Structure formats: structure tokens, C-alpha cells
Amino acid sequence: MNKSISIELFPPKTDKGMEKMKAAVGELSQLKPEYVSVTYGAGGSTQEGTYATVDWLVEQGIETAPHLSCIGSSREEIHDILERYKAQGIHRIVALRGDLPSGAGLGSLGELNYANELVSFIREAFADHFQLEVAAYPEYHPQAPSSDTDLINFKRKVEAGANTAITQYFYNADAYFHFVENCEQMGLTIPIIPGIMPITNYTQLARFSDACGAEIPRWVRKRLEGFGDDLEGIRAFGADVVSELCERLLKGGAPGLHFYTMNQSAPILEITRRLSLNN
Ligand code: FAD
């Protein structure tokens, strides 16, 4: 299969968490991911953890893409972080605005307020050294005043120099296909890779989804609610839903899949096994 597979980790907070994450990366290596990305808390809140995770991945010889969010940081701070990554031989960055602390307004939080400004800044300071991935929202960003405005703002990131986009997770394939079609109509042809979130824990997923504006279709929500504490049932049903989604996306022309692993390998390997992607 000529589709790109990538996986996303978050920086663990404890030694035990780090060991679990390392084990998950070992197990997921059978998918031969094109790269492994590592999240980064806005304003540098996870900086040490992100560095520790990135350092370990680089030591393993794994193609690594640190996330970098600009909100709450100065240009100089961002520049220093990028210099560090460049010195490590890193060539790929996931460039984001980041999430604002609740109640905060823009302006006082940093010097770069939107991801397109971060992309422009990186291109000015580092030319084409980094391949830049940006975020895309098939169900639209929760703060966007309208779908059209959000598309225009997505276009700004592409025009600023993004090479590829990774989407927020979604469970409705049509939202993705419509988004890609709208982008093509606007002349945007960069690969837009669907972000895939496995379903393993309903309460957590519902909370995330409310916060990030990803819709869990009513029938899926109802079925998940019906499982109550039956975690095995949730996982089995979740694997059905997500593997069918992935199959539709790949058949419909999605250029790859980016898995939000939550530092766990089993739910991803179950999905990829069903898609015959495991080696
Ligand atoms: P932007 O593209 O800047 O968009 C944010 C909002 O502002 C949108 O509503 C957009 O329409 C609007 N907008 C954009 N540009 C302009 C402009 N020039 N003028 C006016 N309005 C504008 N968060 C983290 O903190 N750390 C992570 O590691 C992280 N990883 C992520 C990975 C992926 C693949 C995705 C999809 C999201 C990730 N997030 C992460 C969450 C992300 O930071 C939030 O969704 C955030 O609210 C928006 O980030 P963005 O880069 O999409 O912002």
C-alpha cells in the first residue's frame, strides 16, 4: 500500500508512562510509520516532556516530528526551540497555534497568534529546512465564526508554506471528503491526512470531542452509552466503527492515516490488522 502511516504520542509525565510509551512505539513499529509526532503544550507547558520524548525517538533513529504551538511564546523562544530541533537533525514540525488557556484573550499571550503566522515565521527563519504539517478541521474549528472563514484561514496556512495537513479526528467520512473537495476548489492541493482516534473509553472521548468540536454521530454515542462499564464491548464496537471509517477514507482517496495513539498500541494494531496494514 502506498499510503502514509504516521503515529502521534503525547509526552508522558512519569517514568512508568515513559516505559509504556516506549513499549507502544516498539509494537507500532510494525506499521513502519513514516514519522512519529510528539505533542507540545501551548506556552511550553510540556516542553521538558516533549524534549525527553523527542530525544529518545531521535536516539532510536525514528523519523520524528515535534509539534510546536506558538500561542504564549515569543519569536525568540520559538526560534530557540527550532534551532534545537535542527541541530538534532529533525526535518519535520507540526506547526500549530495551540489552545488558549480558558478565559484568556489574544494579544498578551505571545507574538504569534495564529498558525499561519508560525508557518511564515519558520519559513522566514529556516527556509525549507523543515517539512511543515498543519492542522485541518473537516468539521471546522470550534472557534471559527463560519465554515467559509475557517477554510480561508486554512488557506492562509497553506499559502504561508505548509506542506501537508493532518486533520482533527472525526467519525463522519463525508465531512472529510467535503473538506478536501472544498480545498481543491480553492486550489489547495497539499495532502490532507485524516487524523484517526480509536474508540476505547466513551467518557474520555465524549469530553475530548466536546472540547475540540469533533462530532460523535448520535448512533455511535447511543451504542457506546449502551455498553456502560463493558470496556471490552466498547473496544470491539469502537474497532468496528473506526476500521470501517479508515477503509472508506482510504478507498475514497485519503493519502494516508495519522493515528492518535494516546500512547497505546493495541487499539491501533487491531484497526490496522483489520485493514491488512500490519507487517
Ligand atoms: P489556527 O490555524 O491558527 O486556527 C485557530 C482558529 O483561528 C480557527 O478558528 C481559525 O479559523 C482562526 N484563524 C486562523 N488564522 C487566522 C487569522 N490569521 N486571523 C483570524 N483568525 C484566524 N494543541 C496543542 O496545544 N498541542 C499540540 O501538540 C496539538 N497538536 C495537534 C495536532 C493536530 C493534528 C490537531 C488537529 C490539533 C492539535 N492541537 C494541539 C490542537 C490545536 O492547537 C487547537 O485545535 C487550536 O485551537 C488551533 O490550532 P491551529 O494550529 O489549528 O490554529
Image (cartoon, rainbow, N blue to C red):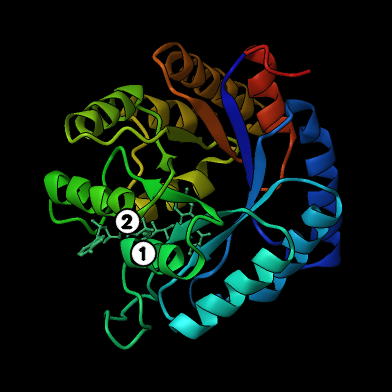
| Residue 20 location (% of width, % of height) | 82, 50
Please tell me in which quarter of the rendered image ligand 1 is found.
bottom left
Q: Quadrant of residue 179?
A: top left
Q: Residue at x 36, y 23 (%)?
A: 173
Number of numbered labels in the structure image: 2
Which disc, if any, is residue 9? none
Q: Residue furthest bottom?
A: 108
User: What x and y, as percent, mark residue 246?
Assistant: 50, 21
Q: Is residue 46 at all visible to an observer of this figure?
A: no
Can you tell which mark lies on residue 160?
2
Q: Is residue 277 above or below residue 197?
A: above
Q: CA distance from mark 2 to mark 1?
A: 5 Å
Residue topped by disc 1: 120
Q: Amino acid at mark 1?
A: Ser
Farthest front residue in view: 127
The quadrant of the image that shows the N terminus is top right
Which image quarter holds the C terminus?
Answer: top right
Determine contact: label 2, label 1, CB under 8 Å: yes
Q: Earlier in the sequence, mark 2 or mark 1?
A: 1
Q: Is residue 97 above or below residue 76?
A: above
Q: Where is residue 203 shown, x and y percent of the image?
A: 51, 47
Q: Quadrant of residue 259?
A: top right
Three-letter amino acid code at disc 2?
Ala
Q: Residue at x 48, y 31 (%)?
A: 224
Q: From the Cβ of disc 2, is ligand 1 less than 8 Å away?
A: no
Q: Residue at x 79, y 67 (%)?
A: 14
